[in-house]
Every structure is written in structure tokens, then in C-alpha cells.
Amino acid sequence: MMSERSFLESLFHVAVEAALPDRCIDAFLPEKPKGRTIVIGAGKGAAQLAAAFEERWDGPISGAVVTRYGYAAPCKSIDVIEAAHPVPDEAGLKGAARLFECVEGLTEDDLVVALICGGGSALLPSPPGDLALADEIALNQELLKSGAPISVMNCIRKHVSGIKGGRLALAASPARVVSLIVSDIPGDVASYVASGPTIPGEGTLEEARAYIEAYEIDLPKAVQRHLSGDAARAPDADDPRFEGNETHIIASAQISLEAAARAARERGFDAFILSDAMEGESREVAHVHSAIAKQVLIRNQPFSKPVVILSGGETSVSLKNKGRGGRNGEFLLSFALDIDGEASIYALAADTDGIDGSEDNAGAYADGDTVATIRKAGGDPAWLLRHNDCWAAFDMAGTLFVPGPTGTNVNDFRAILVK
């Protein structure tokens, strides 16, 4: 009989499979152009998207995509460039420049296919004006520890960039740009994915300034000066150069959660999706999930047990200390503390790209014995949570989940089994 842990891990794999390029790209192949076909892209699954597109495209293509170190996939005609994530590096800077080179000198007969997925913001540094890579790195580091939701971070990023907010699509004009998006954004706002290098979107310069103040983000002085002037404004979505471009969400958290729910039902469990767009502080979102799980366990409300409860989205962590781990681990450690001693609640929280935060795990597994196991190993779960060291906690428990890079990214996956 499959253990509860193995069962929840199997649901993760089903969710990931539903978002793999080989499963989702066929329906969105554009019409062949009269002229050239150029493929560009960025994100943790960009190389896999490029390989899948290349395999299916009937005709000559060229181009380049930028992905995270260790996430490359073999391509014949498309260059795959590896760079750093979540903190940008020089390789990403060169990668962004290479994408601009790919779209130089195009005509209205040419087609640009942009393959965009989560992680592209950090992978495509392109400091504008007098700013340097160090300024963009400092900005990214401040955003990562701010606790701001991804929509806020991307609004700010696109105003401190020479490539985001649709600027790459403008560079390709007058060629038509078709963007194929694997969404890791709550609500599937396409312009938020990778801060929209080919897609203009909402979020004005004035809003970016307000977010910086509201979240008390400590920016380098050079970035502050840049944001104080009109040169920081992102392209207007009404710019006629965007006319005729297309955007398609080809994979998303909702699609993956529905696949996991079907798999759970096939195993004889009821399954419900709370939301595909959960946001907020990870440990606080965990309190909501644990309260629902305990209500089910005790009162069979709002669902009757046995049941699988699923959710997606992207939570955040306000870093106070320099521990190891990521938002899914932080969620799960908080959840584990809430269900300590409960015999019939089991949970998995993991990032669908295969990496959660600073280490090589996607997330972890927890049940009612997890906290006691950590304590027996000499750890203090509450202290570890306060110090943002969820990786150490689940390492002690022996329940880290390490599937490796998945080739896609539709953000957080949370599965809770109540029996």
C-alpha cells in the first residue's frame, strides 16, 4: 500500500506533468510566417519549452533562451544560455543582450516566438541608463527579503530594467511577437510572468514608487535616482507597436491542480481546490490551511474526510534571519507546528520548478509526528521557523522532498490529506 507521503508526492508529479511543455505547447503553435522565425525566451523551464517547440516546428528557426544553471535542455537551433537565479549575474546580463541581438533588424514578415516562464525576472538583468548590474542585484536582494507579493516585485522590477515591461517586444517591432507563457503568477496575469519582457501591463511608475514606500524597501541610491525620473517609465500598453502581438497562457497552477485533483479522486479520495492564487506571508497562510484541515478532521466541515485539499499560488517570506530554505518549507514548518500530535493529517508543500529557495529541495513533507521527530534530533521547530531555517528542520525530520529540476514552473503546490 502506498504511504501517505508517497501518495502526496505522486500528486505533485501529476501536477508537474500537466505543465510540461510536451503536454501543453501543441495547441498554441502559431502560423508560419512569410519571413524568419526567431525564438527567444527566459525562465526556469525556458530550455524545455524551446526543445519542445523546436521538435514541433516545421521550418528553419534560430534564437536563444536563458535559463537557470543546471536547467538546460538540448536544442539543435536555439542557443541555451544558463545564468543565476534568484540573484542575477553577469551571465544573465549577457543573456539579455543576446536576446536583443536575436530580434535586431526584423521585418513585418518575421515572427518572434517568446517562451516565457517563472524565473525570467532574475535571469534577464538589463540595468537601464547609468545603472550597473550591481544595482539590479541589490534591488533584487531587497525585493526578495521584503515580503512583497510577486505582483509588487514585478511592478518595481519592470521600472528598473531595459528589457522588462514589454521592452523586448518593442525591440522586435515591426515583427509579430507571439508569447507562450507558463504562468507562475497568482491570477495568471501574463505581464507579471518574468516581469513581462514581451508583454506590457498594468502597474505605473507612480504605483512602483508607492509600493517601495509601503513595503519599506531599502533601495540603492542610484536606483532611487533612476525611479525619481520619467526615464524609468515602462512602455504604454496602448503603444501601436504592440498591435498584432499575441499572448497565450499555455500552462498554469489551475490546470495542474485540476490534474492532481483528478488523480486523487481516481485513488478514491474526494479532492477540493481552495485556490490557485494564494498569496501572503507563508507562515500565516499555513495557519489558514491547518485550521481548515483540523476542522475537517474534527467536524467534517467544510469537507468530509477522507479528503485531499489542494492549493497553489505564491506565498512570500519576510526574511529576518539567514536560514536555509524557501517559502514552501516555511509554510510547511508553520503547518507542522499547528498539527503537532494529530494522527490523521499529512501535507506536502513544494515548488513545481523543483527548487524551493536556497537549497536543492522542492519542499518537504510533514505530518503529526514531524515536530516530535525534529525535537528528538535536537532541533527546536519554533526557533528554526523564527530564524527562517526550515531546510534544517526538515533535514532533521528526514522529510525533504528533492525531485530535482522539473522543466516547468507553475509555482507553489500544496496538498493536504485528512483521513
Image: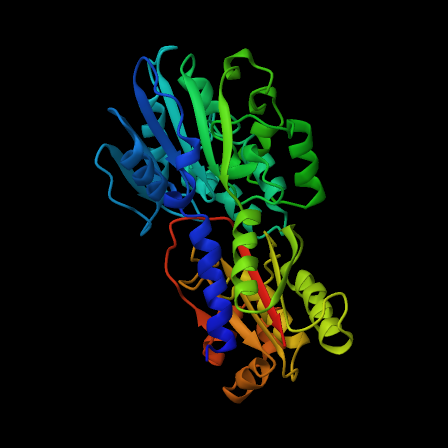
Q: Is residue 392 above or below residue 39?
A: below
Q: Nearer the viewer, residue 287 or 246?
A: 246
Q: Position of residue 33 (x, y in %)?
A: 35, 16
In this picture, residue 408 sits left or right of residue 382: left
Give the quarter of the figure containing the C terminus.
Answer: bottom right
In this picture, residue 236 sits left or right of residue 296: left
The part of the image, by quadrant, that contains residue 297 is bottom right
At horizontal 30% and vertical 34% (from top left) the residue drawn is: 56
Q: Position of residue 373 (x, y in %)?
A: 53, 85
The part of the image, by quadrant, that contains residue 338 is bottom right
Q: Nearer the viewer, residue 367 or 306?
A: 306
Q: Position of residue 263 (x, y in %)?
A: 51, 61
Can residue 90 be seen in this snapshot? no
At horizontal 40% and vertical 15% (from top left) the residue drawn is: 175
Q: Position of residue 218 (x, y in %)?
A: 61, 45
In this picture, residue 342 sits left or right of residue 197: right
Can residue 67 be seen in this snapshot? yes
Q: Nearer the viewer, residue 358 or 413?
A: 413
Residue pushed farthest left? 76
At horizontal 39% and vertical 10% (from top left) the residue drawn is: 108
Q: Nearer the viewer, residue 94 or 326?
A: 326
How was this image coloured?
rainbow
The part of the image, by quadrant, that contains residue 79 is top left
Q: Is residue 368 above or below residue 318?
A: below
- State how many labels appear: 0
In this picture, residue 279 sits left or right of residue 197: right
At horizontal 55% and vertical 61% (from top left) the residue drawn is: 328
